[in-house]
Image (spheres, rainbow, N blue to C red):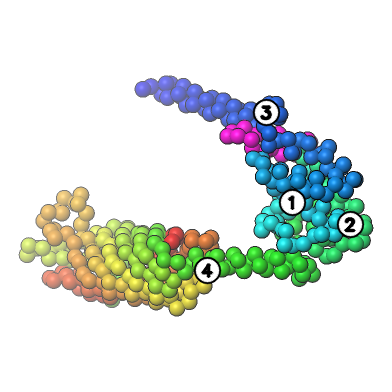
Amino acid sequence: MSGKNHFKIIICVILQIQCLLAGAQKNIEKSFPAADYEALKYIRHINLSLPEFIEQKKWTELNNYIQNWKNSEAPSDELIFCISTLAAIEQQKFSSIAMPCDFLYFLDDYAREMKNIMTEPVKFRYYINVSEHIYYNASPECTKLLNITRSWANRLLSSGNLNVSETFLCLVFSGQTEHPRSEFYTLRKLMPELDAFQHQLDMYQVNRLKSLRDRHAGTFSLTIGTWMPTGYLATVGIHPTAGYLFGYRKKRNEIDFVITGRFVNSTAQNYSILRNDTVYTRSYFGGGYLGVEFTRYFVHTIKFDFGPTFGVGYDEFDIASENDVKYTSLSPAEMMTLNLNTGLRFKYFFHKALFAGLVLKYNFIHFENKGGTDLRGNAFSIDISYGIF
């Protein structure tokens, strides 16, 4: 195929992608009869109903409206939370018992939307997903609603009858707090009710993570590292490594099958080998390690694991690649030895079952090279891992 044809195909593909993206944008911006979607009636009618509910103190009707909205196919959680909380404060019935577990996420979402309306009202967009690839642009309705809730929250603040927790929430709903989560953690000790509620949530999260970390599970990780020989074996030099582990663990005990390869196929110094009564000088190095390792974690927390590791396996030293013209005459083209190793394993869990790790080991090995360069020696190895269990 000619270069011109290649160019034409690339141009066609680019144009097609642009058309698809434009089509997707149209799906989002597309205007359609909102009445066709039952779930949209709550966001569309709330601006007419809410002022009446507040003015006439129709709290039962408001609660029913909010519950139906919450149970619909298109709930706006942060807006529902705002209205229900302000209604509870208005009736002097606010209690953390009725708070949702995700209240800080809802506060952050609300504060971000309020800030966008106050700073860039023309650019503000609020979409509601009504079906696959179809979103309703509820920006006008959301803007009106947040203006109502802002005025409502300011009126409650001016009453002077709020406790610290209620004041904090109304400051968020009035648009006077941009970062509710960080503000909450700074002031939580001044809000006993919210602090106690968040403490229960924190303890639940800790216990859930603890249960997750203590369970029986498989484990898998990828590793990169360095292999550093000692003694006469230092002739071959230091080499980078890469490999993977898979195994099984339960609380403090873990067993892994380990496969590691070594790279950079040249040695720090030449070495000699004896094959078929002929001495060859070589500078090639390859090989790896295949073994089983057991780790006992003396330190075992939600975030950290640390303990000694012990392993046994098979270590290989390749003196030639299969593409080497001398490969046949150098047969056997590898030296093998038992590998007994011990060291320390450390893991840091940064997201539920995901971890980053570090393994420091000393490997007891013995490559027998009769008639050639003395390659006796052991090796240190350092590996960094990234995995899941």
Residue lying at the far right of the rendered structure: 159
Q: Is residue 367 above or below residue 12?
A: below
Q: Position of residue 197 (x, y in %)?
A: 70, 66
Instruction: Label 3, secondary structure: give it.
Output: helix
Which quadrant of the figure has residue 88?
bottom right
According to the image, label 4 marks what residue?
Answer: 210
Cα gap from disc 3 to disc 1, whole angstroms? 26 Å
Cα gap from disc 4 to disc 3, whole angstroms? 47 Å
Instruction: Label 2, secondary structure: give it.
Output: helix
According to the image, label 3 marks what residue?
Answer: 36
The answer to whether mark 1 and mark 2 are in CB contact below 8 A is no
Is tag 1's residue or tag 2's residue first in the polypeptide sequence?
1
* Residue nearer the viewer, 323 or 245: 245
Q: Does the magenta-highlighted stretch encompass residue 124?
A: yes
Tell me where the magenta segment starts and ends, as one range. 121-140
Q: Position of residue 225 (x, y in %)?
A: 39, 63
Q: Is residue 247 above or below residue 66?
A: below
Which labelled disc corresponds to residue 157?
2
* Residue nearer the viewer, 66 or 76: 66
